[in-house]
Amino acid sequence: MKGIAVFASGSGSNFQAIVDACESGELDAKVNLLVCDRPGAKTIERADKHGIPTFVFKAKEYPDKEAFETEILKSLEEAKVEFIALAGYMRLIGPTLLSQFEGKMVNIHPSLLPAFPGKDAIGQAIESGVSETGVTVHYVDNGMDTGPIIEQASVPIDAGDTAEILQQKIHKIEHELYPRVIQNILHTSTEKGEFA
Ligand code: GRF
């Protein structure tokens, strides 16, 4: 069974969906580590409840990105992590981590990329007046939400949808989509003999 890590900065509802899918067997993997850059984030409580080890850090306590990513890398190695899912991790991944996990790191973004990359994708969609937005799962590269797209799902924006309502609709889709896409990737890579 593959050991995975989830990186999250906030509430961690996607972290929770991945953990639940592992526990139910829908996702044939084990969450060996939560990486979080915000001490006090709700996602840490969620990890504790499931006995999942955490690496929690404050970026400003390190001289630069390379320094904290080197520490993250050590934790990933100790936890025998083979695959990473970013889920609301509010930082760009640097070369230290990317060089070790390129092709083995995915992100979920709340829009139909390439539309509305970066922060507040939900607010951007509402502001722009489009009638449809969605969710994208993509591989991580060195850009902001630019890596190769793996799967997308659309979500309609109805008249009167506030950012809060739209976020709930998006979360519902994300929690089903993300574990399923991760399962597909891990299953396919196992069949191909990757991640041996
Ligand atoms: C999700 O909407 C995800 O698409 C985005 O950040 C949000 C994280 O939400 N990257 P949560 O912390 O998983 O609840």
Image (cartoon, grey):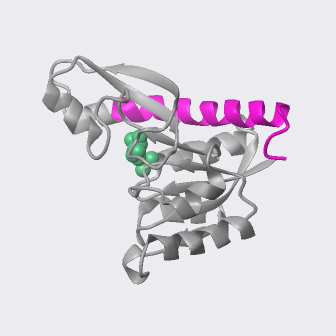
Ligand 1 shows up in which quadrant of the image?
top left
Q: Is residue 183 above or below residue 79?
A: above
Relative horizontal placement of residue 162, taking residue 28 as reference (left or right): left
User: Does residue 180 belong to the magenta stretch?
Assistant: yes
Rendered position, 122 above or below 40: above
Position of 92 with respect to 156 (left or right) is right
Say whether residue 121 is left or right of residue 12: left
- Residue 80 is situated, as x and y percent measured from the top left of the image, at 76, 62
Which residue is pictured at 72% across the width and 53% down the height? 82
Residue 76: % across, % down = 67, 65
Q: Position of residue 123 (x, y in %)?
A: 21, 38
In the rendering, at what x and y percent does residue 173 appear?
46, 28
Depicted 81 relative to depicted 147: above or below: below
Q: Is residue 196 above or below residue 192?
A: below
Observer-nearest of 93 and 134: 93
Answer whether residue 45 is visible to the viewer in this image. Answer: no
Identity of the residue drawn at 69% across and 44% down: 22
Q: 70 or 40, which is in the foreground? A: 70
Identify the residue at horizontal 76%, vertical 33% (top origin): 187
Identity of the residue drawn at 63% across and 68% down: 73
Most frequent secondary structure within the magenta stretch = helix
Residue extent of the magenta highlight? 168-196
Magenta stretch holds residue 78: no
Q: Nearer the viewer, residue 60 or 55?
A: 60
**Where is residue 25, by image quadrant?**
top right
Image quarter of residue 92:
bottom left
